[in-house]
Image: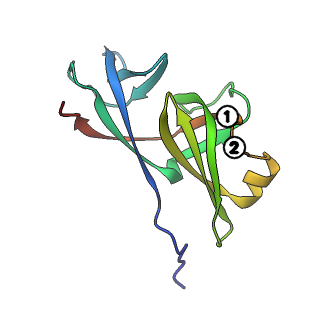
Amino acid sequence: GSFDLGQQMPISLVAARFDRVETDYGMTLLSLGKQRLTVSETLTESEDPYRLRINASDVAVALHRPVGTSFQNVLEGHVLDVQRLTAGFADVVVSVDGQPVVARVTRKAADELKLAVDMTVFVLIKSMAIEGAVCS
């Protein structure tokens, strides 16, 4: 049967500045405040920040900085909001350098991690799409 969450999958738009290209890996490093993001494509240097599009289903939340993970992007932030949805899920809004990133997690995970406003957490981002450079 069809599975309806009753809510669309949230998308976060995050602005990050060009840092450098890692040509060996075909990746670009972007900076978000003092933190780094890796994008698996080669971007051109830009004065304007790049806008990243991140699906909430591609974001996980951890209480501690994980070690030994394939996630390239682990960013520290603090919880702004935990929205419990009806279908067994919760949307966790995390401020990363003042920009909100939404993670769609199970309500069980939200409860087991005791996620609450103002907690320091780490968001693990699986993949993100480039929306292009922000027009100033």
Q: In this view, does 95 lie to the left or right of 130?
A: right
- The image position of residue 115, as x and y in percent, is 74, 46
> What numbered label is drawn on residue 117?
2
- The image position of residue 130, as x and y in percent, is 30, 39
Quadrant where the C terminus sits is top left
116 w.r.t. 77: above or below: below
Distance, label 1 to label 2, CA atoms, is 10 Å
Q: Type of residue at label 1?
A: Val
- The image position of residue 21, as x and y in percent, is 31, 16
Name the residue located 81 percent from the left edge and 50 percent from the top edge.
Answer: 112
Residue in the foreground of this view, choosing between 23 and 21: 21
Disc 1 packing (10 Å; few <14; some 14–19; many ≥20):
many
Disc 2 packing (10 Å; few <14; some 14–19; many ≥20):
some
Q: In this view, does 115 lie to the left or right of 45?
A: right
Name the residue located 64 percent from the left edge and 72 percent from the top edge.
Answer: 87
Q: Type of residue at label 2?
A: Val
Quadrant where the N terminus sits is bottom right
Tell me if residue 47 can be seen.
Answer: yes
88 w.r.t. 103: above or below: below
State the image quarter where residue 18 is shown: top left
Q: Is mark 1 on a helix, strand or loop?
A: strand
> What numbered label is drawn on residue 121?
1
Nearest to the eye among marks 1 and 2: give it.
2
- The image position of residue 101, as x and y in percent, is 50, 42
Tell me if residue 27 can be seen.
Answer: no
Q: What element carries label 2?
A: loop
Residue in the foreground of this view, choosing between 125 and 102: 102
Name the residue located 45 percent from the left edge and 20 percent from the top edge.
Answer: 33
State the image quarter where residue 30 is shown: top left
